[in-house]
Image (tube, coloured by chain):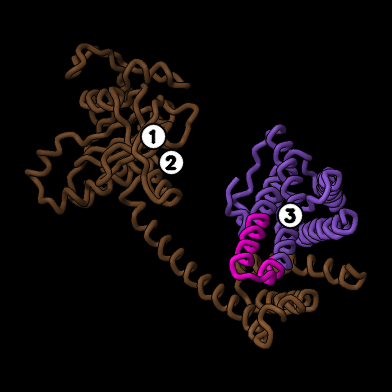
Chain colours: A brown, B purple
Amino acid sequence: MPLLSSVLYLALSLLGYGLVKSVLSFRANRDLPHFLWLSVLLIAAFGLWLELFGGVVDALIGKYRILLALGPLAMFLAYYYWGNKSAFYQKQSSQTNDFFKYYLSPQVISDLQEKGYVPIGGQKRQVSILVTDVRNSTGLCISHPPETVVRSLNQYFEVVTTAVTRHGGTVDKLTGDGVMAMFNAPQTLEDHTSCAFEAARDIQINMKTVNAKLASGGLPELNVGVGIDTGVGIVGNIGSKHMVRYTVIGDVANTASRIQEYANAGEVVLTGSAFKLLSKKVPAATQTVNVRGKGPLVIYKVNVA
Amino acid sequence: MRLSVLWFDASSLSRILDIRAMVGLFLAIVLAYALMSPDFSTPDTLVFRFALSALGMAAVLALSYASVRALGSKISPPWFFTPVLQVLCVSLWVCLAVRVLSLAVDFAIGSHLVAQVVFSLTPFYAFALFGWAVDHSSQIQDRRALASGCAAAFLFAFFSLAFEFFAR
């Protein structure tokens, strides 16, 4: 290659890289200065390429060479159009995600975003399960109109979900007036039992404030019991191709649900396995109870309110 | 390693450290480059081309790393070379495939011009992709990153010219 062509060849390699950088910058910023840079580099690179390889281009398309000038313009317009379209879809997808975050677990949304589908399956994992329930909710529904009960329940759900999220847990499901939350899945928590206990303590403390507000507004007070168990369960996307939930399946979930029945208002009940894993020991009263389906079990009652 | 690096998707740049894989990638790069403009006239030429590709590519990579360090990057060699080798390997093999395809098109239509036009574009795409990979892997910002990418693209283009000259 002659010297001049070699110099042009090297210059075109730099222009090519510059063109890529300006396309990427324009994609990120979409403003006039980046647009101008992109246009200048596009024209310069195209001109240099024609200067170097114009002979071949001429031989290939002959007198229609002038049409090549439209190429970069067409490419740019196409890019601009698709860029705007994808930005529109991204905005729409983000709005959809904001909507579905109230209905689907973060893990399911993340799977949908990354893979386009939710893979069904799970993994064995040690988790702490926290279950809350409102005492005498059936009586409340009988003695108060449903609108009043719902207003009270919404405040209780706010307290529970806030406490769970604050301590790194994930709300698994709302079951009527109950809430089930898991710790150490999907987010790994080193001291998940203590996190669950701290969340339970927050719930009971904050429920006192909520109850005071409810009473002053003439709404029924809610007495909440909390149960915690730590054990191994299968955590993952459980369900069918029609409906999937990110949840935990195993004895640990059932036990937490059963023992919360023994918690009075302001109390947190833990199983032996959960109580032993607490990093800070707390005073607790032990009680042997006959858990449905499991037989006698020692539970630890902590009064936190 | 994902093919989306071909359209400059930075999230596809893998940083999995594996020395054996890096050696394999380097050999694949050399093979792809030597096959870009094959000259099977004599076995001696063939061996010479492979040796020249290997030395040239090693020099380009080493000089790119040196330029990145000179521009203030603190990145260690394995963290730099892993993504760069992967991008280079993918881009060269894809360019090779495109060249073979354009030759096939030429053969089908009884011309040699389509391949020539394609051959005139693929090197610059490979240079730009290499520059971008070095720019991203250098982990430096703004103008210094731009300079590192320019230096890498220039070095690769220079090697490409020198290879054509010496391998003739």
- Please indicate, yes or no, whether residue A197 appears anywhere in the rendered image: yes
Please give the range of residues in magenta. Answer: B95-118
Pointer 3 residue: B36
Q: Amino acid at mark 3?
A: Met
- Please indicate, yes or no, whether residue A44 appears anywhere in the rendered image: no
Q: Amino acid at mark 2?
A: Arg
Q: Amino acid at mark 1?
A: Ala
Earlier sequence position, callout 1 versus callout 2: 2
Pointer 2 residue: A166
Front-most of residues A265 and B35: B35
Q: Kindly indicate the quadrant of the structure image that contains residue A89.
A: bottom left
Q: Mark 1, mark 3: which one is toward the viewer?
A: 3
Q: Residue at x 25, y 49 (%)?
A: A154
Pointer 1 residue: A199
Question: Which percent across, then down, holds residue A146?
Answer: 12, 51
Q: Kindly indicate the quadrant of the structure image that contains residue A229.
A: top left
Q: Position of A108 compared to A188: left or right?
A: left
